[in-house]
Image: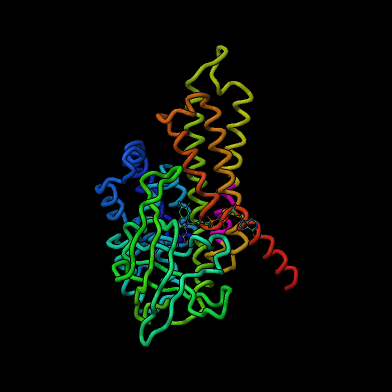
Amino acid sequence: MIRDQETLSSLLDTVGRFVRERLVPREQEVAENDRIPDEIVQEMKELGLFGLSIPEEHGGLGLTMEEEALVAFELGHTSPAFRSIMGTNNGIGSQGIIMDGTDEQKERYLPRMATGEIIGSFALTEPDVGSDAGSVKTSAVRDGDEYIINGTKRYITNAPYASVFTLMARTNPDEKGAAGVSAFLVDANTPGISLGKPDKKMGQSGSHTCDVIFEDARVPASALIGGKEGQGFKTAMKVLDRGRLHISAVCVGVAERLIDEALRFATERKQFGKHLSEHQLIQAMLADSKAEAFAGRSMVMEAARKKDNGERVSTEASCCKLFCAEMVGRVADRAVQIHGGAGYISEYPVERFYRDVRLFRLYEGTSQIQQIVIARNMAKELQE
Ligand SMILES: Cc1cc2nc3c(=O)[nH]c(=O)nc-3n(C[C@H](O)[C@H](O)[C@H](O)COP(=O)(O)OP(=O)(O)OC[C@H]3O[C@@H](n4cnc5c(N)ncnc54)[C@H](O)[C@@H]3O)c2cc1C
């Protein structure tokens, strides 16, 4: 749903220019230094990019899913690391509070997340618990007006900068499945919390993950999201539905950028007396990439509109995540191929993007988990 075309067009124009003029020229520097410059983060804050999906009454832009997807397409045109720093505030780090938080929790965190003053992270994965997210082992034991938290969370995006974690922990040890899991808002400066070393990753330099370790960390009972135990898994799944559409839109944007890079290279370089772009086997790779990126864009738009209409989009969100994450992998592979040997050399952006996009098939639910969600929903719908 687009609320006001003029306002949206102006936002998209501003974000598009910011991406092309401020972010793209600094991609290589970010990759080499493994750090996003402070002035760039400051500019992102001033543009409101940390609060895209946070409701207006809490200081954000309150974009609808369709509007957010259109912005995410633009953000995809540069290194995913830039999006990652603001990604958790717009997605997994804030959506639990927006969807299921109490008024007090919303007031306490959302306005500062919207401005980028604080960063929110989402802590679900553990050393022994990944795709099987309902079997979380981190424990939260009630003790008077507090919970005592013990456990380790793994690969937590933006944890080194986070002020607050949306934490999934088991409040009911007798219930081994998802129904025993609750969601908490835990301030990062709580005594008993420590961070592991930043992980050395395959790509997306400039974005950081690490372990978050809880050792007898005490949080007030008011930190329970929505004030109810046993709702954590449901909260996490709702958060991921929205996040999956956002990530899918980013994949489409990255695919479009890679197609631009490949097309430019193919129209500049000549072999056998003519430009690469005039060779039909190269044209086939360009055309397949274009068609697949267009399919991804269309899917995301359709699913986003459905979500804005209040319809359930669990299946569609997983279809988008599955298709778009795999699609951008194929597009990146072809972009490297079209560049020939240059595609393997790091001074060309396609080499970096090839590594960066690999993550999209792994986090916020692997491709196999999307397949499982889709097939499970299909079987459920048959019975309804
Ligand atoms: C850079 C990065 C950032 C991340 N950020 C966050 C974050 O901010 N917060 C957070 O909580 N987590 C985060 N994660 C964790 C991420 O979501 C998990 O890595 C992911 O969900 C997969 O879990 P796993 O690594 O334990 O793999 P596993 O679950 O062990 O899966 C291994 C393989 O088995 C497959 N598999 C698993 N179960 C099945 C099945 N039933 N049927 C078929 N195949 C199956 C998987 O698809 C995969 O191919 C991040 C990870 C990375 C790498």
Q: How many marks?
A: 0
Residue appearing at x 50%, y 51% in the figure: 249
Residue 128 in sight in this render: yes
Image quadrant assignment for residue 148: bottom left
Q: Quadrant of ligand 1?
A: bottom right
**10, 15: nearer the viewer:** 15
Q: Residue at x 72, y 66 (%)?
A: 379
The percent coordinates of residue 350 (x first, y second) are 47, 34
Label the magenta part by its dominant secondary structure.
Answer: helix
* 300 vs 196, nearest the viewer: 196
Residue farthest toward the right in the current orientation of the protein: 383
Q: Position of residue 55 (x, y in %)?
A: 39, 68
Whether residue 11 is visible here, answered yes or no, is: no
Looking at the rendering, the stretch of residues picked out in magenta corresponds to 296-305
Q: Is residue 357 left or right of residue 43?
A: right
Q: Position of residue 271 (x, y in %)?
A: 54, 15
| Front-lying residue, 11 or 324 | 324
Residue 249 within the segment the image draws in magenta: no
How has the structure been colored for display? rainbow
Is residue 303 magenta-colored?
yes
**Res. 111 image quadrant:** bottom left
The vertical placement of 345 against 219, above or below, is above
Which residue appears at 48% of the width and 81% of the height? Answer: 229
Residue at (31% x, 45% y) in the render:
35
In the image, residue 299 sits, relative to residue 235, either above or below, namely above
Q: Extreme front residue here?
A: 215
In this picture, residue 270 sits left or right of residue 89: right
Residue 373 point in image, percent of width and height: 63, 62
Pick the quarter of the image with the C terminus. Answer: bottom right
Judged from this view, the residue extending furthest toward the bottom is: 144
| In the displayed structure image, the side of residue 319 where residue 187 appears, left or right | left
